[in-house]
Image (tube, grey):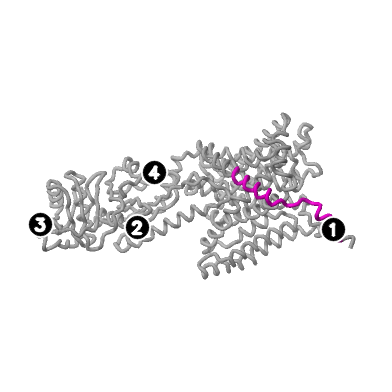
């Protein structure tokens, strides 16, 4: 009985949860993190840098130890730490979930060369730096007390070798580089780097002999991690394909499916923690083994459910807990040289390693340089690893602070330096070249359609079909570039971009089927864009279409028209697709554009098997009739009571004449027809 009372007394003597304080602190953390992220995003820096910096500023670095301690009471930090750890589990699961081995396909040699070189060099330099810290009297204090040299040195090497795949992916997406060859190479290299680096870190922790505090397990238990990983890959992963089948059967992400995912994630994290590695490895591993085959929708819905709670609430708590351990005020002038040494090893080691690895595979200089800069991105992933090192006694508090500064500097510098090696104009041109290559090399007559969300773009396809005038081979290319307005978010995945892309593709499938019904192939280019006008201008320059079709009022139209010499057909915004037997109504001017509009309207009427109505002043109609007659199309007056005459179907050849600014409007109109187009022969146009 006495033992029971002692246990109860001991249990009640610890920190007591003050729920009001915790809730208020969570609200403060969220507000500060979002404001800091939004502020740095305006100057082109990833918001995660601002959120990490906000955690540092709320700690003793800015507020001082006393004020920071009052704002975040020591007896309540343990409860915040639990939330931060749960956030890490969710985030590492998302990182594993987004890691797609297919990114490496076709790029194995370059990805392997860049990844291995960009790990070996900084890893070696990191060990050398650790040796300097131990042997130099000026820096010996940076070595953590109680840590042996090799565990400390190996951890320093691993910490220098990390590339943050999530941060890099967001930088590429924000700069639209993920659609270029360089972006694809960077993703492949970062994915390979992630796999090697996380494995290396797990091995380092195993060699270091640190465990999760589970002393009831024998020391050799850590070697059980190897069969655990094998079981996860060859047993658990095939079993998880049942989630895909269940998802397709239900048609949605059910609570039962999500529960299986959460339970698996938590059990995997708990297992690796017990085995003495770290719980983040288990969460990462479970995310990585979630099936990719026919599971894109399932993975997207999982991300949507988990990412927001992780990004908005739990990760900012982790940034705060990390920031409370950083004390920049505690650094002195004696730490300047160690900081410069850390920055030099981190930046030069990663850049030179990646550059050399790329050049060994004959990657061009500018591209290899871009890869070197991108592989230097560390951000949140580095912060996670540094916390592991501090938790396991492999970093001192001073060295932890210096390494956090390094993580922020290397992440901030990536974007601005990329502007020199890979400017945005080159990005836009490479994107256009990639789209051109995807369309194939066959020489065809091509009409480019600038589709708009909210409009019935089938009318534009009809106009494009008429403009092609029966040319063969021919194709219509639909562009649906959606503005990428949201700032770069780390941890939120790219699911929103992917969802917008999927919605655009779904919209365009209607146009593809419409084109098939007209007997002409329709190709689609749809993706988010940070600069729609620039992307369209580059795309027009690369595709060199014979004509463009767009809606009036399209904000990108002026820039595209200015850069394009082909005829431009502008349809009135909001005009619905007319019924099959509705007349084509042309409102034209008495000039070359009006004449071209009449010819295009005639062709559209022939394609649709209906008639054309010419509207406007007498001289406009006379000019249009002359233009049509010159092309073998007779315009005859019809009595009001007889109604419009059906156009005779024709084989139309040639291409429309005219310049920019052709305005055509097709609409359903029940008014009597004044004129009807009657085909008398083959329609042709001057060369």
Does dot 4 land on a helix, a strand or a loop?
helix
- The residue wearing badge 2 is 522
In which quadrant is the N terminus drawn?
bottom right
- The residue wearing badge 3 is 637
Q: Earlier in the sequence, mark 2 or mark 1?
A: 1
Q: Residue at x 68, y 62 (%)?
A: 267
Q: Of circles 3 and 4, which is in front?
A: 3
Give the magenta part as a residue range: 4-32
Q: Of circles 2 and 3, which is in front?
A: 3
- How far apart are the two marked residues, 3 and 4, measured between alpha carbons? 45 Å
Does dot 2 land on a helix, a strand or a loop?
strand
Q: What residue occupies the far front of the structure in this picture?
A: 20
Q: Earlier in the sequence, mark 1 or mark 3?
A: 1
Q: Earlier in the sequence, mark 2 or mark 3?
A: 2
Q: Residue at x 75, y 52 (%)?
A: 16
The spot of residue 622 in percent (x, y) is 12, 48
- How far apart are the two marked residues, 1 and 4, measured between alpha carbons? 70 Å
Q: Nearer the viewer, residue 26 or 661?
A: 26
């Amino acid at each position: 009985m006495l033992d029971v009372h002692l246990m109860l007394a001991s249990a009640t003597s610890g920190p007591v949860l003050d729920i009001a304080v915790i809730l208020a602190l969570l609200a403060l953390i969220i507000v500060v993190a979002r404001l800091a992220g939004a502020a740095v995003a305006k100057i082109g820096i990833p918001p995660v840098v601002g959120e990490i910096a906000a955690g540092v500023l709320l700690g003793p670095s800015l507020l001082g130890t006393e004020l920071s301690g009052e704002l975040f009471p020591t007896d309540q930090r343990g409860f915040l730490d639990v939330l931060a750890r749960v956030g890490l589990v969710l985030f590492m699961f998302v990182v594993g979930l987004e890691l797609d081995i297919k990114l490496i396909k076709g790029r194995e040699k370059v990805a392997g060369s860049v990844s291995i070189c960009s790990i070996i060099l900084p890893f070696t330099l990191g060990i050398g730096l650790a040796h300097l810290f131990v042997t130099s009297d000026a820096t010996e204090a940076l070595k953590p007390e109680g840590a042996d040299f090799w565990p400390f040195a190996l951890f320093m090497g691993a910490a220098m070798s990390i590339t943050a795949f999530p941060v890099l992916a967001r930088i590429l997406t924000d700069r639209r580089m993920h659609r270029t060859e360089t972006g694809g190479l960077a993703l492949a290299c970062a994915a390979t780097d992630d796999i090697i680096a996380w494995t290396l870190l797990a091995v380092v922790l195993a060699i270091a002999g640190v465990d999760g505090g589970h002393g009831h397990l024998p020391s050799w238990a850590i070697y059980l991690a190897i069969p655990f990983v094998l079981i996860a890959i060859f047993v658990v992963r095939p079993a998880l394909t049942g989630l895909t089948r269940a998802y397709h059967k239900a048609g949605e992400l059910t609570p039962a499916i999500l529960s299986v995912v959460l339970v698996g994630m938590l059990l995997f994290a708990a297992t690796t923690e017990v085995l003495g590695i770290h719980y983040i490895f288990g969460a990462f591993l479970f995310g990585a083994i979630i099936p990719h085959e026919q599971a894109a929708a399932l993975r997207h819905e999982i991300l949507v459910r988990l990412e927001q709670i992780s990004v908005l609430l739990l990760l900012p708590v982790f940034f705060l807990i990390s920031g409370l351990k950083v004390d920049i005020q505690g650094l002195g002038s004696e730490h300047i040289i160690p900081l410069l040494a850390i920055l030099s090893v981190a930046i030069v080691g990663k850049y030179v390693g990646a550059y050399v690895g790329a050049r060994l595979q004959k990657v061009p200089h500018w591209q290899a340089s871009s890869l070197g800069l991108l592989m230097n991105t560390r951000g949140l992933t580095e912060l996670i690893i540094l916390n592991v090192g501090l938790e396991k006694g492999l970093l001192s508090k001073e060295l932890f602070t210096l390494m956090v500064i390094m993580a922020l500097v290397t992440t901030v510098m990536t974007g601005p330096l990329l502007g020199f090696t890979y400017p945005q104009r080159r990005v836009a041109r490479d994107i256009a070249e990639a789209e051109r290559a995807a369309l194939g090399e066959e020489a065809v007559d091509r009409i480019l359609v600038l589709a708009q969300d909210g409009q019935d773009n089938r009318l534009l396809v009809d106009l494009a079909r008429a403009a092609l005038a029966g040319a063969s081979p021919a194709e219509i290319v639909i562009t649906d570039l959606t503005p990428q307005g949201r700032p770069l978010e780390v941890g939120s995945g790219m699911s929103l971009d992917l969802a917008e892309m999927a919605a655009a593709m779904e919209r365009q499938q209607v146009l593809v089927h419409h084109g098939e019904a007209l007997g002409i192939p329709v190709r689609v280019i749809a993706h988010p864009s940070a600069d729609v006008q620039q992307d369209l201008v580059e795309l027009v320059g690369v595709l060199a279409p014979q004509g463009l079709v767009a809606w009036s009022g399209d904000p990108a139209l002026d820039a595209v028209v200015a850069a394009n010499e082909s005829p431009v057909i502008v349809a009135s915004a909001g005009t619905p697709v007319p019924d099959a037997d509705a007349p084509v109504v042309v409102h034209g001017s008495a000039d070359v554009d009006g004449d071209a509009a009449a010819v295009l309207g005639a062709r559209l009427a022939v394609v649709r098997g209906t008639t054309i109505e010419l509207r406007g002043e007498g001289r406009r109609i006379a000019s249009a009739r002359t233009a049509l007659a010159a092309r073998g199309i007779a315009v005859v007056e019809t009595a009001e009571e007889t109604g419009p005459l059906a156009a005779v179907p024709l084989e139309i050849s040639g291409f429309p004449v005219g310049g920019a600014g052709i305005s055509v409007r097709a609409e359903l109109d029940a008014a009597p027809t004044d004129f009807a187009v009657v085909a008398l022969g083959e329609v042709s146009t001057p060369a």
